[in-house]
Structure formats: C-alpha cells, structure tokens
Amino acid sequence: MSSISTRDSTAAGHADSSALRLGTGLMKLGAAAFVGYAVIFFVRNFTDSFLELGIGPGEVSVGKDQIQQFSPSLYDYISHLHIAVSGFIAATGVAVVFLSWFGVRRGHMWAWVGAVAAPVLGLAVALPAHYPYGFDTIGHLGLIYLATVIFVAGALLSLKGLRETGS
C-alpha cells in the first residue's frame, strides 16, 4: 500500500508543470461543456422545441406536434433516442472530467489516452452523419465545436506537460 501512496505522491508532483495544470483545466472545461450540451439536448426533448438545438424548419419540415399526430410511436422512438444520446454525451463528459482531474493532472499518460479517446470516438461516429442530411448548422454543432476546440487545446497542452515531465 505504501508503494501506491509513494507512486501517487510522485505523480502528483507532475501537476507542478504549468502546461499540465492549464491543459487539464481546459480539458475539464471542454468536458464539462459536453455535459452542458447533453443537458440542453435532454431538456429540449421535453419542451415544445423537441428537436435538437439548432435544428428547425430549415432542416426538418415538421415539429413535435406533427410528428405526434403522424405517428405517436415514432415520436416515442425519437424521444427515447434523444434521451439515450444525451445520456451518453453526459456520461462521456463526466468520465473525461474525472480522467483529466484525477489522472492526467497527476501525470498519468494512460488517463490522457482514455480522456482523449472517449470523445474522439464519440465525435468520429456522430459528426459525419450530420453533413449529408443538412444537420450541420452552426446552431446545432457550434457549441460542440467550441467545447471540442477548448478540449483539444487542453489535451495538446497537457500532452506537452506530460512529455516535459517524462510521463
């Protein structure tokens, strides 16, 4: 047990790197923004807006009421997808916050790899489907792009800090 404590306190010394401190702060901010986006996504499902942020009549020719009138079961299916996707976005954000805060900040490269891989995988799967269908509006993807830019800046800065400390 003492070797774990020694290893943790040694790794905690890596947090002295300003690049690592600032980088993990930006990673946590970007990941928290993913959670915020998920909350917006979730709440809109239960409002008259129903459709995702930034998606309106220009992208989808019907709204909540028309979908319900056309097919209540289709409405329920779309609603369940909104809820599920918002849950996975939020879960990814929470996991990345904790990996960044308690792993990357302490100088653990494995935590950096996990913190970067999770949102990269999610975005690599989700983003391409927006473009062929015209769902790539700035109102829809803008907040995710902003969170991603903040997160990537933090990830690169953290990586610099990890490399400087020899992690």
Image: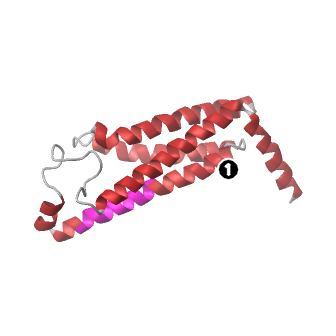
Residue lying at 28% horizontally and 64% vertically, measured from the top left = 79
**Quadrant in which the C terminus appears:** top right
Q: Which residue was labeled with disc 1?
A: 102
Q: Main secondary structure of the magenta part?
A: helix
**Quadrant in which the N terminus appears:** bottom right
Across and down, in percent, residue 84 comes to 38, 62
Q: Is residue 35 left or right of residue 109?
A: left
Residue lying at 62% horizontally and 46% vertically, measured from the top left = 100
Q: Is residue 58 left or right of residue 121?
A: left
Q: Residues within 10 Å of mark 1 (few under 14, many from 20)?
A: some
Q: Magenta span covers which residues?
A: 76-89
Across and down, in percent, residue 70 comes to 11, 65
Residue lying at 60% horizontally and 43% vertically, measured from the top left = 113
Residue lying at 79% horizontally and 40% vertically, measured from the top left = 13
Q: Is residue 146 left or right of residue 107?
A: left
Q: Residue lying furthest right in this view?
A: 2
Across and down, in percent, residue 73 comes to 20, 70
Is residue 19 or residue 122 the one in the foreground? 19
Q: Amino acid at mark 1?
A: Phe
